[in-house]
């Protein structure tokens, strides 16, 4: 998957990423949710096509923020 992010808000175990390709595109939102949910350590993914935000909750002992961002 290859998307461009305009910002990342990160706390340990929580990422909020603004992805312009998600805004207005429910199919793209679902695809990102499906893609990220397959990674070990990802607990939940919620992509909002209204705002273009993707909220990712993860276990930082199993996966690092950099790995999540890289997988996009």
Image (tube, rainbow, N blue to C red):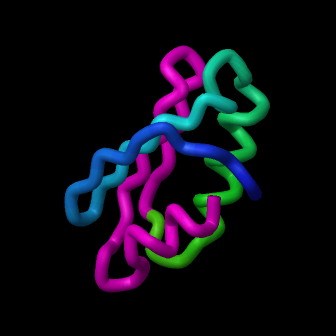
Residue 53 is left or right of residue 25, and the answer is left
Magenta stretch holds residue 40 = no
Measuring from the top left, give residue 11's x and y in whole percent.
Answer: 21, 57
Residue 11 is left or right of residue 37, and the answer is left
Residue 29 is left or right of residue 14, and the answer is right
Magenta region: 43-72
Measuring from the top left, give residue 3's x and y in whole percent.
Answer: 68, 47
Q: Quadrant of the C terminus?
A: bottom right
| Residue for point 74% across, 54% down | 2
| Residue for point 68% across, 31% down | 21
Q: Is residue 22 above or below residue 38?
A: above
| Residue for point 69% across, 52% down | 34
Q: Residue furthest bottom?
A: 61
Splitting the image into 4 quarters, where does residue 52 fall?
top right
Measuring from the top left, give residue 25's x and y in whole percent.
Answer: 73, 22
Q: Is residue 13 above or below residue 30?
A: below
| Residue for point 35% across, 52% down | 15
Q: Is residue 2 above or below residue 63?
A: above
Measuring from the top left, give residue 36's x and y in whole percent.
Answer: 60, 59
Magenta stretch holds residue 51 = yes
Residue 54 is left or right of residue 49, and the answer is left
């Amino acid at each position: 998957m290859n998307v461009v992010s305009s910002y990342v808000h990160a706390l340990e175990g929580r990422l909020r990423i603004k992805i312009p390709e998600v805004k207005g595109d429910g199919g793209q939102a679902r695809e990102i949710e499906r893609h990220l949910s397959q990674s070990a350590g990802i607990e939940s993914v919620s992509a909002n096509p209204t705002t273009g935000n993707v909220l990712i909750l993860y276990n930082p002992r199993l996966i690092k923020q950099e790995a999540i961002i890289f997988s996009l």
